[in-house]
Amino acid sequence: MAWDGDDYQARFDALAAQGREMHGEADFVMVYAPATVLDAGCGTGRVAIELARREIEVVGVDADPSMIATARRLAPDLEWVEADLTALDLGRTFDLVVMAGNVPLFTAPGTQGALMAACARHVSDGGLVVAGFSIDQGYGLSEFDGHAGDAGLALVERFATWDREPFAGGDYAVSVLERGAIS
């Protein structure tokens, strides 16, 4: 799928201008008090920029050059990496990896296991991976939980929204996964 980062960002800017709350994902992440965050599938950087504003050290990664170009324009002082998340190796770990915006659904079919392995590779022992996505689009929770488990990640909490509404089924889930110590 081809994206236009500026057009994508304009939609969020219009929502913000209407008074819509645009930082639910950042609010969610802040509950866990991370010092460092990898925004995996950062798009135009909306979540990463807000986390940096809240004094979190953040790195944004996205495979789409147009999205990264917009993110770099909006926040040139942040670290933006154009890369395929399924093969990502930044050579460092973070307290928390966040995947907002249906990232597992934009990953090429059949590569979600590699996506989860890459996320696990970038989270410190005891750190968290947080992923929110529509679970009615061909990649559901059973597959997601299986891929997470294969990557050494265990489910800690699951919510229906970024506002922490309890999960009781439905078509969207925000999952919080913890990486155990490497043996």
Image: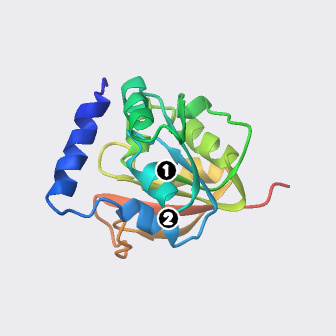
Q: Is residue 143 above or below residue 51?
A: above
Q: Is residue 165 above or below residue 6?
A: below
Q: CA distance from mark 1 to mark 2?
A: 20 Å
CB-based contact (under 8 Å), mark 1 and mark 2: no
What is the number of the mark on residue 144? Answer: 1
How many marks are shown on the rendered structure? 2
Q: Amino acid at mark 2?
A: Val
SS state under label 1: helix
Q: Amino acid at mark 1?
A: Phe
Closer to the camera, 83 or 161? 83
- Residue 179's image quarter? bottom right
Residue drawn at the location 68% of the way across and 34% of the way down = 89
Percent position of residue 98, x then y: 51, 53
Q: Residue furthest right?
A: 183
SS state under label 2: helix
The residue beneath circle 2 is 29
Q: Residue furthest bottom?
A: 166
Q: Is residue 2 above or below residue 106?
A: above
- Residue 88's image quarter? top right
Percent position of residue 112, x then y: 51, 38
Q: Would residue 182 appear left or right of 77 to someone viewing this image?
A: right
Residue drawn at the location 32% of the way across and 58% of the way down = 172
